[in-house]
Image: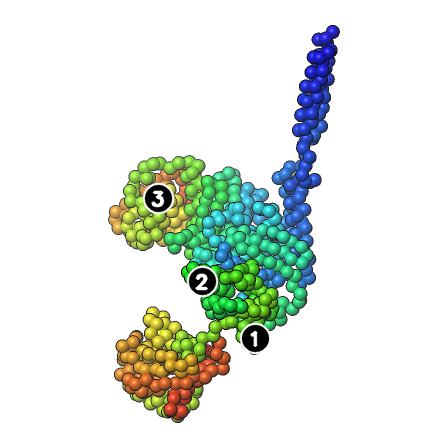
């Protein structure tokens, strides 16, 4: 009987084990069913908003170009229509998309789209090196999707982009006003200030680089990409810089500063270069019609007459700029750079900042290039007389329409109000 | 009695086990079942009817990262340009071989997948990849977006696409049937990746029909084929004549081996194939390259 008990006991174990082989499924449905359902659900979510989606697109692994607004409208036939703040506001481009199963549910922009693909195109149509471009993605993992918000992760870049339903049906109108605001808010240098801190910030594209100092006094760098919003800017993710938490900022257009929406004591103030510096780094078109001072006019009349008499030629373009800004192959010497339609020349001018709104200029023939020397001997010294009193400098006071991005600058010589001329940012012929 | 009892118990237990184990049935639905369908368009239909069914080739004009080389940054191909290139491919390439060798040859040896990529693939060395073939299975064509269907230029088409297609197809041929190793002994100064530093005329003088041919014997072999058949007789003769006499001799010796290989291994007469391709090339401007 003992044996029977043992056998029964053993048998019950065997039975127990054998039944253990049946495992409960963690998921009710198979992985295929689940992913297929997710694909369908996400496709429905993507195609639902009537006005499409507003995408905050951050290309590139380290988001070195920052973020840009794209508008996307997906239809149920597999077409996607795209617009973007970095193209003309009324431009759209349509191409194909699909939502499929890859490493998770993936949204693929798999045919070329003039607007969307500009970020992934390795021929670098907008920015970046050839072979790389802006390193945006064609394929995005859908990390999270609901009717109010879709989070995408670039499959190659790993950078996150967020889609939110577009409120307005008027894409072009929205983008046009967005572009104006973004232009206004674009700066290349800033200062970040907190309750007891002031940190220097440089900018490249839409990314800020903070020059920080640690407790030991060593300096180190933090960085954060950002995107413009309708009323300010927003960091790629909230970032802490020397204990200051940076996330969303509202732009105060009057005071020219970005104020943290969380903590108003945190402020990012743009740095605007003095007009003297902007003048020294810019390319300024000289037009005869804009030489308003009688002295300036007489210098140019004499120059035109002498040069024509000696050569039969006239100026077609005349600039105050770096040589290579106007003539390819020239070096970057700044000065009176000219082109007759046949011959080009550069007459070097040393320009120095005297005050934020004052510069002095003096002719420096050692910095001539191209036909500069020849031109100087054929009548150009008359033109140069307006900028430089022989080998002595002339000092000018500069006024402008817009210190941040001037479309013109007006120079009047100190002590000689008849030497008065206005230069434009636009490319125009001399006469 | 005891033994019978024991046996009975064993049988019962065994029966129980077998029942217990057979309870769970496998889910008949495969986890790989692909019930999802991307909406099909007119071009998909055209590919299916004109390429896939007759030639057993899958033409992928939509960029798929798993099909493409992820070490490059790539842009997808433009829809309209893919349509144009697909039609050109059928007319200039598939039908050329079909005309010469009948339809079973292409079906058997042609790569089974053709992938269109919009941008070129840029290498760090500054060179760009025109196309690649993988193990005879797949041909990838790059820079499809540079095609201008409204202003066809046969030289451009040859440079970017058809030279490449014939080049890659020739790789498949020699990967299927080896060519004589005598070929590898004609030139002994292959340049590997440094071919980019060689000029066209240097390559010719060294006995290579193109710069890329100087990289290694397999490339040399297929460059001879693709250069020969995508250009006119006059072009080939002039090109060879511009080489040094030493270069000319080498190119001629190589061409003899190539010609013999194609004839005996595949029944392809190079001159007939060239005539067919040239005749078709002259007709491309009259093709409707839209859907």
Q: Name the residue under label 1.
A: A253
A62 on left or right of B181: right
Residue at the outermost top position? B1
Tell me what residue is drawn at x 38 percent, y 37 percent. Answer: B179
The chain ID associated with circle 1 is: A
Give the answer, above or below, for where B33 lies relative to A333: above
The chain ID associated with circle 3 is: B
Disc nearest the viewer among 1 and 2: 2
Disc nearest the viewer among 3 and 2: 2
- Please tell me if label 1 and label 3 are on a single chain: no
Q: Mark 3 points at which residue?
A: B216
Q: Which of A425 and A387 is in front in this view?
A: A387
Mark pair 1, 2: CA separation: 30 Å
Tell me what residue is drawn at x 57 percent, y 46 percent. Answer: A103
The C terminus of chain B, quarter of image: bottom right
The N terminus of chain B, quarter of image: top right
Mark pair 1, 3: CA separation: 64 Å
Q: Name the residue under label 2.
A: A213
SS assignment at label 3: loop
Q: Nearer the viewer, residue B204 or A136?
A: A136
SS assignment at label 2: strand
In the picture, the disc for residue A360 is none
User: What crowding class fits label 3: few (fewer than 14 Cα within 10 Å), some (14-19), or many (20 or more)?
Assistant: some
Tell me what residue is drawn at x 58 percent, y 69 percent. Answer: A264
Residue A329 at x, y = what percent? 34, 69
Residue A100 at x, y = what percent? 61, 48
Quarter location, residue B170: top left
Q: Are marks 3 and 2 in contact (CB under 8 Å)?
A: no
Residue A316 at x, y = what percent? 38, 81
Give the answer, above or below, for where A185 lies relative to A399: above
């Amino acid at each position: 009987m003992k044996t029977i008990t043992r056998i029964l006991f053993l048998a019950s174990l065997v039975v127990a084990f054998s039944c253990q082989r049946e495992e409960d499924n963690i998921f009710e449905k198979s992985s295929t069913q689940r992913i297929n359902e997710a694909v369908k659900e996400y496709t429905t979510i993507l195609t639902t908003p009537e006005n499409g989606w507003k995408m905050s697109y951050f290309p590139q692994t380290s988001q070195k170009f920052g973020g840009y607004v794209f508008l996307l409208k997906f239809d149920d036939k597999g077409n996607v229509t795209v617009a973007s703040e970095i193209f003309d506001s009324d431009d759209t481009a349509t191409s194909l998309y699909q939502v499929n199963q890859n490493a998770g549910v993936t949204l693929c922009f798999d045919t070329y789209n003039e607007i969307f693909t500009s970020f992934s195109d390795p021929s670098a149509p907008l920015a970046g090196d050839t072979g790389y471009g802006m390193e945006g993605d064609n394929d995005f993992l859908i990390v999270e999707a609901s009717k109010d918000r879709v989070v995408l992760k670039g499959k190659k870049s790993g950078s996150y982009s967020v889609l939110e339903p577009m409120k307005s049906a008027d894409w072009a109108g929205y983008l046009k006003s967005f572009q104006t605001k973004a232009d206004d808010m674009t700066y290349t240098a800033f200062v970040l200030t907190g309750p007891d801190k002031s940190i220097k910030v440089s900018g490249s594209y839409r990314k800020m680089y903070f020059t920080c100092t640690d407790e030991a006094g060593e300096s180190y760098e933090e960085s954060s990409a950002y995107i413009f919003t309708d009323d300010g800017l927003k960091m790629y993710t909230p970032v802490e810089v020397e204990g200051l938490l940076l996330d969303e900022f509202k732009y105060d257009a009057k005071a020219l500063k970005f104020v943290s929406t969380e903590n108003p004591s945190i402020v990012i103030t743009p740095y605007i270069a003095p007009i003297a510096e902007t003048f020294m780094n810019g390319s300024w078109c000289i037009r005869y019609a804009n030489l308003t001072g009688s002295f300036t006019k007489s210098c140019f009349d004499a120059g035109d007459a002498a040069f024509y008499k000696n050569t039969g030629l006239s100026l077609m373009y005349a600039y105050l700029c770096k040589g290579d800004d106007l003539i390819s192959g020239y070096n970057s010497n700044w000065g009176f750079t000219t082109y007759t339609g046949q011959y080009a020349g550069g007459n070097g001018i040393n320009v120095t900042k005297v005050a934020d709104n004052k510069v002095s200029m003096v002719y420096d023939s050692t910095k001539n290039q191209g036909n500069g020397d020849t031109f100087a001997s054929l009548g150009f010294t008359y033109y140069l007389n307006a900028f430089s009193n022989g080998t002595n400098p002339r000092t000018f006071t500069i006024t402008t329409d817009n210190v941040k991005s001037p479309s013109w600058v007006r120079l009047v010589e100190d002590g000689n109000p008849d030497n008065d001329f206005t230069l434009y940012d636009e490319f125009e012929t001399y006469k | 009695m005891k033994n019978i009892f024991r046996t009975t118990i064993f049988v019962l237990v065994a029966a129980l086990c077998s029942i217990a184990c057979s309870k769970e049935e496998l889910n008949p639905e495969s986890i790989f079942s692909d019930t999802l369908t991307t909406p099909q368009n007119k071009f998909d239909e055209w590919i299916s009817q004109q390429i896939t069914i007759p030639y057993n080739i899958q033409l992928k004009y939509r960029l798929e990262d798993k099909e493409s080389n992820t070490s490059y940054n790539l842009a997808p191909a433009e829809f309209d340009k893919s349509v144009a290139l697909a039609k050109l491919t059928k007319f200039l390439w598939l039908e050329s071989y079909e005309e010469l060798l009948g339809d079973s040859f292409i079906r058997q040896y042609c790569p089974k997948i053709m992938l269109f990529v919009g941008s070129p693939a840029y290498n760090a060395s500054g060179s760009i990849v025109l196309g690649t073939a993988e193990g005879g299975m797949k041909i990838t064509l790059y820079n499809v977006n540079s095609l201008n269907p409204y202003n066809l230029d046969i030289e451009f088409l040859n440079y970017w696409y058809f030279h490449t297609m014939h080049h890659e197809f020739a790789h498949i041929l020699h990967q299927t049937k080896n060519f004589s190793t005598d070929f590898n002994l004609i030139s002994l100064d292959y340049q590997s990746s440094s071919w980019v530093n060689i000029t066209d005329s240097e390559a010719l003088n060294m006995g290579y029909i193109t710069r890329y041919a100087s990289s290694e014997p397999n490339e040399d072999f297929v460059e001879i084929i693709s250069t020969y058949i995508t250009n006119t007789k006059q072009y080939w003769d002039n090109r060879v004549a511009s080489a040094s006499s030493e270069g000319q001799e080498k190119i001629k010796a190589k061409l003899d081996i190539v010609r013999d290989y194609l004839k005996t291994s595949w029944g392809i007469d190079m001159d007939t194939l060239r005539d067919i391709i040239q005749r078709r090339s002259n007709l491309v401007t009259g093709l409707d390259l839209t859907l």
